[in-house]
Amino acid sequence: MKNPFTIISVFTEDKIGFKGNSAAVIQLHNPISGKQMQAIAADLNQPATTFLWPSLVTNTFHVKWFAPDAEIGLCGHGSLAAFAFLSDTVGIDTKMSLDYGNGLITGSANDDGSCQMQLDGIEVLGELAIPRVLEEGLGVKVKAYYKTNNKNIVVLENEEQVKNMKPNFELLRTYEEFGYAVTALGKNCDFVSRTLVPHVQQLEDHATGSSHAALVPFWSKILNKTVMLAYQLSPRGGKFECSIIEGVVTLAGNYKAIVHGYLNPEFAVEPQDKN
């Protein structure tokens, strides 16, 4: 039985040259092991590979995400790509849900090449002292540093610092923190950011939904706004239309399908033990 997949780039914006972040989305008929998913993700070598398989609930799908070298606990751009992918079979404007074990992410696609999703906002847990290794690793003066249960938020003085920052990933890797959402006020948008993940293969993520699940509540309180526009100033760039209501964050953006295909059936079943 064939397992369709598509590589989709999300949070794109042609007008300002943002290519967004790509994810492979694979529809499975039955779940396979994490080991097998990891092997497939390594072969496809995308920033994220999203695996979907049916739930007993209508228009709800189980989901797991893998980078080429590790499982991802929460992947926003891989989720948005999943809603774009599923709209071909479930339908445009149909509300869908992804069950990732720790909650549901809901979303839908539109007929104008955009889609949106809703996920729980990630709150700041407290302000932290600024580690010397963080400033040295970023090569810029840090204005403030905050703890979250995902990536920590690093606030810089202005957009230029975020854009021109040249991180020393080897130095950042000497500190135990998994990742950072480096951010500042924007000039042509409400806020800008870059996401750094020094302990994994990719090092910098291109357009990061999980970071914005934390950045939207953070900037909403500072700016006293519930609807915002955000740019991720990665090498590829990402545009996020953001809003927050009662702690639930909505992220919307454009998407483009890059490649359609089918997974070789032998890769979508568990290998048999020959011993």
Image: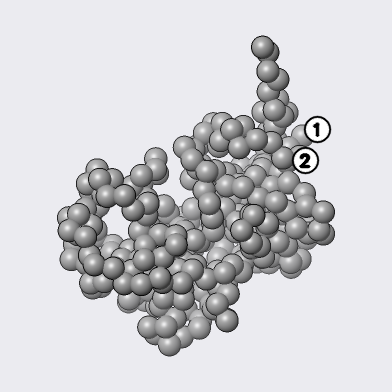
Q: Quadrant of the N terminus?
A: top right
Tag 1 near tag 2, CB within 8 Å: yes
Q: Residue at x 62, y 32 (%)?
A: 36
Residue sitting nearer the eye, 111 or 53 = 53
Residue sitting nearer the eye, 181 or 81 = 181
Residue 79 picture location, percent across and down: 60, 56
Residue identified by numbered label 1:
1
Report the side of 201 relative to 26 (left or right): left
Mark 1 burial class by Cα count in 10 Å: few <14, some 14-19, many 20+: few
Residue 210 drawn above or below residue 251: above
How far, Cα to Cα, is label 1 from label 2?
Answer: 8 Å
Dividing the picture into quadrants, the one containing residue 224 is bottom left
Mark 2 burial class by Cα count in 10 Å: few <14, some 14-19, many 20+: some
Residue identified by numbered label 2:
29
Residue 66 picture location, percent across and down: 54, 43
Q: Of the numbered discs in the image, which one, if any, rests on residue 133?
A: none
Q: Residue at x 46, y 72 (%)?
A: 123
Q: Residue at x 36, y 66 (%)?
A: 147
- Is disc 1 placed on a helix, strand or loop? loop
Observer-side mark, 1 or 2, equals: 2
Q: Quadrant of the C terminus?
A: top right
Residue 90 drawn above or below residue 49: below
Q: Residue at x 68, y 13 (%)?
A: 274
Report the side of 167 relative to 69 (left or right): left
- Is disc 2 placed on a helix, strand or loop? loop
Q: Amino acid at mark 1?
A: Met
The image's colouring method is one colour
Q: Amino acid at mark 2?
A: His
